[in-house]
Structure formats: C-alpha cells, structure tokens
Image (spheres, helix red, strand yellow):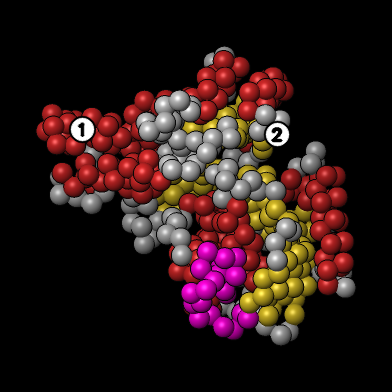
Amino acid sequence: MIHTLKEIYGAEATPLQAQRYAAAAEEFEALFGMKPQRFFSAPGRTEVGGNHTDHNNGRVLAAGVSLDVIAAVVPTDDGIIRIKSQGFPMDTVDSSDTEIKDEEENTSCALIRGVAAGMLRRGYKVGGFTAYTTSNVLKGSGLSSSAAFEVLIGTILSGLYNDFAVSPVEIAQISQFAENIYFGKPSGLMDQMASSVGSFITIDFADTANPVIEAIDFDFAASGHRLCIVDTKGSHSDLTPEYAAIPAEMRSVAQFFGKDYLRELTKADVMANIAALRAKLGDRAVLRALHFFGDNERVVKQAAALRSHDFKKFLKLINESGDSSYKYLQNIYASSNPAEQGLSLALYIASDVLSGEGACRVHGGGFAGTIQAFVPEEKLEKFKSAMEGVFGEGSCYVLSIRPFGGTEVSL
C-alpha cells in the first residue's frame, strides 16, 4: 500500500509531482508549524464502458486516472481529524463522535465523519490526524473528485491506524456509506471503487448488495494512446429532468414485464414485444432499453479485449458504445435545448482528427459536460489543438490510466 512517485505517476511526470508534494509539505508547515510525516494519494476515475447501465443493475467498466487528491499528514493522539484543503476552510471532526449531524449534510465534514463511522462499524480503528490536501481532480468533469476525497480519508485511516489492513474494496464500500448516509447523496459504488482499486475494473451490479468487482491487469502506458477528457463547457443547469428520464424510461420497460430493472430481462423479451411497448411507452423508452442490453454486454467484451491485450478490439468496442449512446440512449444533447450541442460538436471534431484511429464517446451522464477519447500519441497535439481551438485553452485534459488506487506515497 506504499508506492513511489515513479510507480504512481510514471517517470515523465515524476519531477513535476515531486514539486507538487514539496509545495504541499511547505504549505503544511506554514499552516501547522511542523513538518508532515507521511503522504497519501487517491485518484479520480473515468467511466470507460457501460453508459447509464448501473442504475438498472447492469455492468460498468471504469478506471482510476492520473489526476488525484494528495495529503500531507501528521497523526495525532487526541482523536481529532483536522483537514485543511486548498481553497477551503479547515474541517474539524472528532473521530469518536460518529452521530449523523443534519447540519453537516452536503459538506466535507460529513464525508470525514462518515468514513470514520464506516471504519468503526467494520471493526477497524480510527484516530486523529492533521492534514493539508490539494487536488487536481477536475470538479464537474465526471472524474469524481468527491469519491477521491472519501477514498483518501479511508486510505489515511487504514495506513495510520490499521497497518493497511482495510482492503481497497472495503475502503470503497465505506466511502459509499459515508456519501449515502452522512453526506446525503444516493450514489452508486462505481466512483469509489475505481478510485480505491485503481487501474481498470469491472463492476457487476446484478446483486446490488454484493456487487462483483474484478480488476483487470492491463498496461495502458504501453498502448501507444493517451486518454483525453474534453470539457465542452456546457451548462448542467435545468438538465435534471433529462437525466431523470433515462432511468425512469428504462424502468418503465422493465415494469411492462412486471420487473423492477432491465437486468431482469433479455433483449429478446423487448424485441418480441416492441409493438406493444411502442404503443404504451413510446419509441425513446424502447431505444434506451435496447442501448442498455447492448452496452451491458459490451462491458464483458471490453474487459475480455483488455485481458487478451487486444487494444484494437477494445477501441472498436468503445466506438460502438459511443455510437449507441448517440443513437439509442440519446444523451448527447438535451431535447429541451437543441441549439446547444457541444458534445455533438466535440464528437465530430474528435472523429475528424482521429480519422478511423483511436476512439471517442460521451463521458459520464451526458447532455452537457465532457467527452472521452483514446488518442494515438502521434495525433495528441493535433487533437488537443483542435479541441482547444473550439472549446478554449485548457479544455482538453491529457490523462493516463493510473495503475494504483488509494495509496501512501514514498517520496
């Protein structure tokens, strides 16, 4: 559970990361009047496969990315957790007080207290520490900055007080518990699991109480591609009805058959009843259900391609997933605002630059926000220039898949 900068970030990025950690250490000393003793890191995540499948008990493919939240830390013996995050006020939580505080809902204190409570519920130890954190996980980008923060707290408590006995899967489950029960957000497990485990993982939500998580050993750095997330700067305001309609319409198809979720059905069930489904629910609900079955199976095929090191087939499946989201899931632009189609434009530009190489798809929930692209290294500068020429400087983030999840860092 302890890795070097080179192991985490790669040789090329190590000098810059060393400066980043040194700056965090200096800020810690300036704030608290002492030098930090230990350093920790937890990554953001990207959804790679299974677009809008998890809420109908489907499968997803996700991965930890090279952007992360880091912490400079000193353990304390008073049981108090004090965290100063860059740009935010100090959070102070008594780790022995695990009562839910209504006034803390939707705050980082709720996440800290919730993680401590989750540790104790599972029989692990908790204690105090002082930390300074800084993050380059982009907020609102679909890379899950909140999950990275939760996993960071769990990793620190595991390292300081449990000799890293808390497994990455348990840390993810504890983090989800904190977000659901203490923070007040009913999130799934994908974000926390990808951050905690790192690399590529699949999650099968057929049994939501006991999701099946499998790590995939694949060296993305050797693929000759870079992962790009493009922020189209679209507004998410007033899009809640668009997002809510997707699970609602998918479940309406399941309910037609007396089921709760599409995972309880097969594509054949829908195909055999299309006429009746169209008449009762409309075409879009049927199309979204058909997308679910296609993308749910694609996750299995994507994972198999990575395990067999067939990256060309993996990219083909990514493009197929993106095509299905565009045509059948229909989450590329809001039907309520057809004049704004930043994702559509970004996907066109990506396809134009890639010219049959690499892959691109919508990233995350859709309608506005970001696209994901796997770009051959020789086309990276052209791709970045084309995107930033349309969406502005700094809109194209060049990432890599991180081989480790939450970890202590050896400088």
Q: Which residue is mark 1?
A: 282
Left or right: 168, with 136 as reference point = left
Residue 28 horizontal/vertical position (percent): 82, 65
Q: Which residues are magenta?
A: 94-116
Does residue 351 appear in the picture of this structure? Answer: yes
How crowded pointer 2 is (Cα within 10 Å; few <14, some 14-19, many 20+) is rated as some
Residue 353 horizontal/vertical position (percent): 61, 17
Quarter of the picture holding the C terminus: bottom right
The image quarter containing residue 324 is: top left
Left or right: 280, with 300 as reference point = left
Of 388 and 329, the residue lying toward us: 388
Q: Which residue is mark 2?
A: 394
Does residue 226 appear in the picture of this structure? Answer: no
The image quarter containing residue 86 is: bottom right
CA separation, marks 1 and 2? 41 Å
Asked if residue 107 lies in the magenta stretch, the reply is yes
Say what secondary structure mark 2 lies in: loop
How crowded pointer 1 is (Cα within 10 Å; few <14, some 14-19, many 20+) is rated as some
Residue 30 horizontal/vertical position (percent): 87, 67
The answer to whether residue 273 is above or below residue 70 is above
Asked if residue 406 lies in the magenta stretch, the reply is no
Q: Residue 51 bears which disc, if any?
A: none
Say what secondary structure mark 1 lies in: loop
The residue located at (42%, 59%) in the rendering is 186
Of 242 and 200, the residue lying toward us: 242
Residue 72 horizontal/vertical position (percent): 77, 64
The residue located at (85%, 55%) in the rendering is 23
Q: What's under tag 1, amino acid-wise?
A: Gly
Mark 1 vs 2: CB contact within 8 A:
no
Quarter of the picture holding the N terminus: bottom right
Q: Which one is earlier in the sequence, the residue at label 1 or at label 2?
A: 1
